[in-house]
Amino acid sequence: MRMRLLALCFVPLLAGCGYNTIQTLDEQANAAKGQIEVQLQRRADLIPNLVSTVKGYAQHEEQVFNEVATARSGLVGAIQTHDPQQMANANAQLTSGLGRLFAVAEAYPQLKADQSFLRLQDELTGTENRIAVARGDYNQAAQQYNTYIRRFPAALTAKVIGSKEKPYFEVTNAGAREVPKVDFSNPAPAGSSSTKPPAPSPQRP
């Protein structure tokens, strides 16, 4: 606290040592991180409807549904921390859970043709693309900020005002990187194109 008060007294002097640039880069990085949070929240908001749709055809896949629900809760919690690495790890866990959910969908041709399922899948894909863009923007902004505060004389100013390096939005939990691969372009198995409404406990083809 004492150092910060002292820093405020010398803002005019610090301006020549990169103070204004540090503040600008900090704001840019924070704004980019905010965009990641918005898109992650959007992704989390789509999950309940997706799970509900899949349940209509695969009611007995409770373990998968629970995994996705747990991963979604973890992502929502991580967003509240505003920590890029926690958000990245939680998002990867959700991606892994969704991979298992989509793998389940592969066994239900009727589900794969369901319009609600297709719409939600498209919305998730669009959101994931926006997350990727936001992640790139944030990591670039964080790199610029981190590089700048390490350079002289900005490094002196950063030390005085307490500026710290920003963590990148990257997965630090190796286990979270394991994602099931699902190819939706594969044709449905022969004889699995029945148009009957889904039974309470549909059998796998």
Image: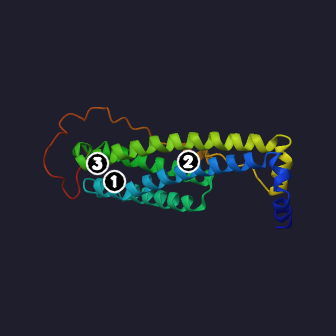
Against 171, residue 56 (above or below) is below
Residue depicted at x 49% and y 53%: 38
Numbered badge on residue 50: 1
Which quarter of the rendered picture does the C terminus lie within?
top left
Residue depicted at x 22% and y 52%: 202
Please give left or right for residue 115 compared with residue 104 in the image.
Answer: left
Spatial CA span between label 1 and label 3: 7 Å
Numbered badge on residue 176: 2
Q: Position of residue 85 (x, y in %)?
A: 62, 51
Please give left or right for residue 65 compared with residue 22 in the image.
Answer: left
Q: Amino acid at mark 3?
A: Phe
- For this rendering, which residue is in front, 133 or 83? 133
Q: Mark 3: few, some, or many residues within 10 Å (few <14, many ≥20)?
A: some
Upstream in the sequence, badge 3 or badge 2? 3
- Tell us which disc is closer to us: 1 or 2: 1
Upstream in the sequence, badge 1 or badge 2? 1
Residue depicted at x 33% and y 36%: 184
Dot 3 lies on which element? Answer: helix
Numbered badge on residue 117: 3
Q: Position of residue 157 (x, y in %)?
A: 83, 50
